[in-house]
Image (cartoon, helix red, strand yellow):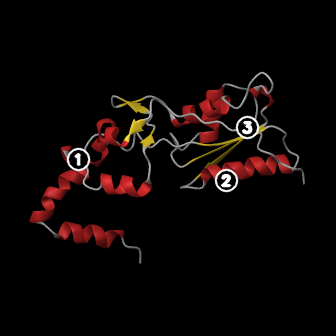
Amino acid sequence: MRQVYITRLSKYLPNEPVSNDEMEGILGMVNGKPSRARAMVLRNNGIKTRYYAVKNGIKTHTNQQLAANAIKALFDDKLPISQLQVLAAGTSSPEQILPSHASMVHGELGMGNVEIMSAAGACCSSIQALKYAYLSVAAGVADTVAACGSELFSAWSHASRFQAEADSWKDLDKNPYIAFEKDFLTVDA
């Protein structure tokens, strides 16, 4: 088995950083009210800023564009992207089911033939992509590989997507059975 080394790292973050105080200005407020749990959640997770692929309510990047921009930053005149042999891309938020996320990233890169592998699933998809890239080099299948993980949840996190749930809250006082029904239906037996 060959030795494997990580020789380059890169990242791509869309738009300007958004502070905790600016979050609801970008994502909106559910039911037109500030979040009551936001301060507690932010205090506990320790995040001070984040990056959203949304501006003025309009999506500015696709998930594959985020990944492709990070991958492009790995290559230069000393190591041109034309030497890439394997592209492994992981995400739990692909733009569509088919073609795969790695296929879409490959298309964004606009390059020739490379082996691609898509990993999907919550929390571990980027590590699965890294493992595939590692194994490709270790087995002698490839010399130049790129592994990436990318997520795009900001467009899905807009307050408008939660309004229907907020509208049902007002019915809860009139019909408390709604809460029981939701709890009952979400418990696995």
Q: Is residue 2 left or right of residue 69?
A: right
Residue 160: x and y in percent read 28, 42
Q: Quadrant of residue 20?
A: top left
Return the residue at label 2. Answer: 128
Three-letter residue code for mark 2: Gln
What is the distance, in whole Å, between disc 1 and disc 3 at their CAs?
A: 42 Å
What is the distance, in whole Å, between disc 1 and disc 2 at their CAs?
A: 37 Å
Q: Residue at x 81, y 46 (%)?
A: 5
Q: Quadrant of the N terminus?
A: bottom right
Residue 183: x and y in percent read 29, 70
What is the distance, in whole Å, between disc 2 and disc 3 at their CAs?
A: 18 Å
Closest to the observer: 52 or 94?
Answer: 52
Identify the mark at residue 34; answer none if there is no mark.
Answer: 1
Q: Residue at x 28, y 40 (%)?
A: 28
**Residue contact at pointers 2 and 3, CB within 8 angstroms:** no
- Looking at the image, which residue sits at the far left? 174
Q: Going from the N terminus, do you reach mark 2 or mark 3 first?
A: 3
SS at mark 3 in the image: loop
Location of residue 137 with respect to 108 vertically, above or below: below
Three-letter residue code for mark 3: Arg
Classify mark 3: residues with Cα within 10 Å, few (<14), some (14-19) or many (20+).
few
Classify mark 1: residues with Cα within 10 Å, few (<14), some (14-19) or many (20+).
few
Residue 108: x and y in percent read 61, 28
Q: Quadrant of residue 49?
A: top left
Which is in the foreground here, disc 2 or disc 3? 3
Residue 9: x and y in percent read 69, 38
Return the residue at label 3. Answer: 8
